[in-house]
Structure formats: structure tokens, C-alpha cells
Image (tube, rainbow, N blue to C red):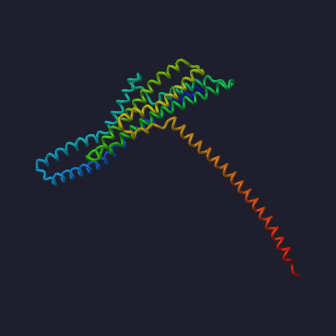
């Protein structure tokens, strides 16, 4: 059983790594088609800006030297904007990769820090729990099993938060050429500037998450080494609480640092955390409870309405029957 679980552990880690590589490679294949459309948008906006500038210069009565200066300025700014648009995906990948390496080196983990490292450690702990549990002691076995499942859930949450931000950075770099094409026109140039600010914000989020991973991994490896191959209740409790704390921090801290760049549109990336899940569970639970209460009230109201209707009908028939009897008696029956 342990060998089977070990094989499943290795297969799970390799599956996640392959999925990440496949997503990154697929996102890079979009760049050629997106760049072609971005070039069309870029030159359309660029010539619109040139025509408008020359028209304004002609209305003002600009000399030939003024027209030449305007044309040179347009060529310089258009060339810089075209260079920034063409190299936008490469710049974004370089920014994200440099921030990732910076955080890995600062945390002492280097470039070997993989997104699935927490999940691998949790699977190793869970494997040790399965090997050591004894079902003739059901209370201890169930408690250890629940602790192991909770650790797996928390580490999977941390891994998902990092994977989502990484996938967002790859997709952002691939489709960002469209936004950079708006740098050809002066009134839409802020869109291109905001793209690079957003790229820096996403890279800052990745840096903070990698720093948290490095710090948490060092601590959790120390707890795992202290437990050895026989996990105990105290060690599992410390491990579980630490994983929960890291999951909460991986949700809130990266958004705080990413907001330094003043672009809040990317703050929702990777923000579906424990608090969101608890809010959703509370919402659906409350909605279900309100629905049950509403159904109970509707049933009670329906029963009381039926009862009132039955009493009214009974009174009506009784009063009507008496009145009809008196009328028939007073009139009599003619032969």
C-alpha cells in the first residue's frame, strides 16, 4: 500500500508540473496571432494620430520646418512604442522570472523551489500517517487521518494560489500585446503604461508568495524532521496550523504588496482563498436554511388556510341549511 501511495505521490507531482509546462507552452503559441492583430491596431492608431497632428499644424499655419519637426517626433515616439509592443511578452517574462529568482535566492531555496513543493511534503506526511495508523485504535486513527486530509487541503490551497498567479502572468504576457498596441496614440498611451505597471504588480505578488513558500517550507521541513517517520498528535497539530496560517497569508499578503504599484485590477488574481470559501459556504448554508424556514412557514400557512376555509364552509353550510329549512317551513308545500 505504501509503495502504491508513493507512486501516486510521484505521479501527482509530475502531473502538476506537466500541466504547468503545457499551459506555459500553449500560452506562448498565442503570441504570433495576437502580435499580427496588434500590429494592425497599432498602425491604424499611429496614422490616425499622425493625420490629426498634421491637421492641427496646418490649421495653426506651421512652417515647413515645423512640419518636419512634427514628423520626426512622430517617428521617434512611434518607433519606441512599436519596440515596446513587439518585445512586450519577452519583457513580461523577464520581469516575472527575475522576481521569482530574487525571491528564491532571498529565501535560501534558490531556483529549485517548485510550485508543488508543499504538496509533495504534505503527501509524504500523509504517507507516513497511513503507514503508522492502527485501526484497532479507531480514535487515534481517525484523528490522524483527519489531520492528514486537512494538511493536504491546506497545502493544495497554497499550491493553487501560486499556480494561478503564475498562469495569470503567462497569459498576461501572451495577450498583453493587444494592450501595448494602444501606445501608438497619445490619448490611449496610458493603457500601455498600465500594462507594464500591472506586470510589475503580478511579479511582486509572485515574489511575495515565493518568499512565503521559502519561509514556510523551512519551518515545515523542521517540523517534519522532528516528527521523523512516526507522526504524533502534537507534530501533526503544529503542521496543520502552520499550513492553515500559510494559506491565509498566501491569500492576503501578495495583494497588499501588489497594490503598491497602484493597479488594483490584478488584485483578484489568486484571491479565492479560505475566507472566500467560508463566505460561500455561509451564504449557501444560510440560503438553504432560509429556504427550509420559508417552506415550513408556507406549509404552516397553507395548513392554517385550509383549516380556516374548512371551518368557514362548515359554518356556511350550517347557517344556510337552517335558513333554507325555515323558508321551506314558512312557505309550505302546496298540493
**Could you say which is closer to the camera, residue 227 or residue 1?**
227
Q: Please, which residue is most extreme toward the front here? A: 330
Number of numbered discs overlaid on the protein picture: 0
Which residue occupies 60% across, 22% down?
233
Q: Please, which residue is most extreme toward the left here? A: 64
Q: Is residue 218 left or right of residue 47?
A: right
**Could you say which is closer to the camera, residue 224 or residue 53?**
53
Pinpoint residue 255: horizontal percent, then vertical percent. Answer: 42, 34
Q: Quarter of the image containing the C terminus?
A: bottom right
- The vertical placement of 228 against 306, above or below, is above
Q: Is residue 305 left or right of residue 223?
A: right
Q: Is residue 58 left or right of residue 148?
A: left
Which residue occupies 49% across, 21% down?
221
Which residue occupies 55% across, 27% down?
6
**Could you say which is closer to the camera, residue 291 or residue 7?**
291
**Could you say which is closer to the camera, residue 277 or residue 138?**
277
Location of residue 19 by image quarter: top left
Location of residue 178 by image quarter: top left
Pinpoint residue 49: horizontal percent, then vertical percent. Answer: 23, 50
Pinpoint residue 297: horizontal percent, then vertical percent. Answer: 67, 50
Q: Quarter of the image containing the N terminus?
A: top right
- The vertical placement of 163 against 59, above or below, is above
Which residue occupies 31% across, 45% down?
35
- The vertical placement of 210 against 37, above or below, is above
Q: Please, which residue is most extreme toward the bottom here? A: 335
- The vertical placement of 63 against 258, above or below, is below
Pinpoint residue 267: horizontal percent, then vertical percent. Answer: 42, 38
Location of residue 202 by image quarter: top left
Amino acid at each position: 500500500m505504501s509503495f502504491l501511495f508513493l507512486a501516486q505521490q510521484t505521479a501527482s507531482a509530475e502531473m502538476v508540473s506537466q500541466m504547468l509546462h503545457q499551459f506555459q507552452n500553449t500560452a506562448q503559441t498565442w503570441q504570433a496571432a495576437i502580435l499580427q492583430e496588434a500590429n494592425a491596431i497599432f498602425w491604424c492608431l499611429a496614422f490616425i494620430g499622425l493625420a490629426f497632428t498634421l491637421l492641427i499644424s496646418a490649421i495653426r499655419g506651421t512652417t515647413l520646418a515645423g512640419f518636419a519637426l512634427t514628423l520626426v517626433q512622430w517617428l521617434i515616439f512611434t518607433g519606441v512604442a512599436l519596440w515596446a509592443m513587439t518585445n512586450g511578452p519577452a519583457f513580461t517574462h523577464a520581469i516575472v522570472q527575475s522576481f521569482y529568482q530574487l525571491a528564491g535566492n532571498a529565501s535560501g531555496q534558490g531556483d529549485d523551489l517548485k510550485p508543488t513543493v508543499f504538496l509533495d511534503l504534505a503527501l509524504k506526511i500523509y504517507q507516513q500517517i497511513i503507514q503508522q495508523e492502527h485501526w484497532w485504535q479507531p480514535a487515534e486513527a481517525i484523528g490522524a487521518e483527519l489531520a492528514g486530509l486537512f494538511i493536504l487541503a491546506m497545502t493544495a490551497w497554497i499550491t493553487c494560489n501560486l499556480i494561478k498567479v503564475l498562469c495569470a502572468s503567462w497569459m498576461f504576457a501572451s495577450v498583453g500585446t493587444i494592450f501595448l498596441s494602444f501606445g501608438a496614440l497619445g490619448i490611449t498611451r496610458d493603457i500601455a503604461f498600465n500594462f507594464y505597471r500591472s506586470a510589475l504588480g503580478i511579479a511582486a505578488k509572485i515574489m511575495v508568495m515565493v518568499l512565503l513558500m521559502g519561509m514556510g517550507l523551512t519551518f515545515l521541513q523542521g517540523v517534519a524532521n522532528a516528527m521523523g517517520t512516526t507522526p504524533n498528535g502534537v507534530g501533526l497539530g503544529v503542521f496543520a496550523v502552520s499550513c492553515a496560517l500559510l494559506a491565509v497569508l498566501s491569500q492576503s499578503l501578495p495583494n497588499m504588496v501588489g497594490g503598491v504599484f497602484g493597479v488594483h485590477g490584478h488584485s483578484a488574481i489568486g484571491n479565492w482563498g479560505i475566507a472566500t470559501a467560508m463566505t460561500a459556504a455561509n451564504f449557501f448554508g444560510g440560503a438553504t436554511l432560509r429556504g427550509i424556514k420559508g417552506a415550513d412557514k408556507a406549509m404552516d400557512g397553507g395548513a392554517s388556510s385550509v383549516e380556516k376555509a374548512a371551518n368557514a364552509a362548515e359554518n356556511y353550510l350550517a347557517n344556510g341549511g337552517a335558513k333554507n329549512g325555515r323558508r321551506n317551513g314558512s312557505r309550505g308545500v302546496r298540493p
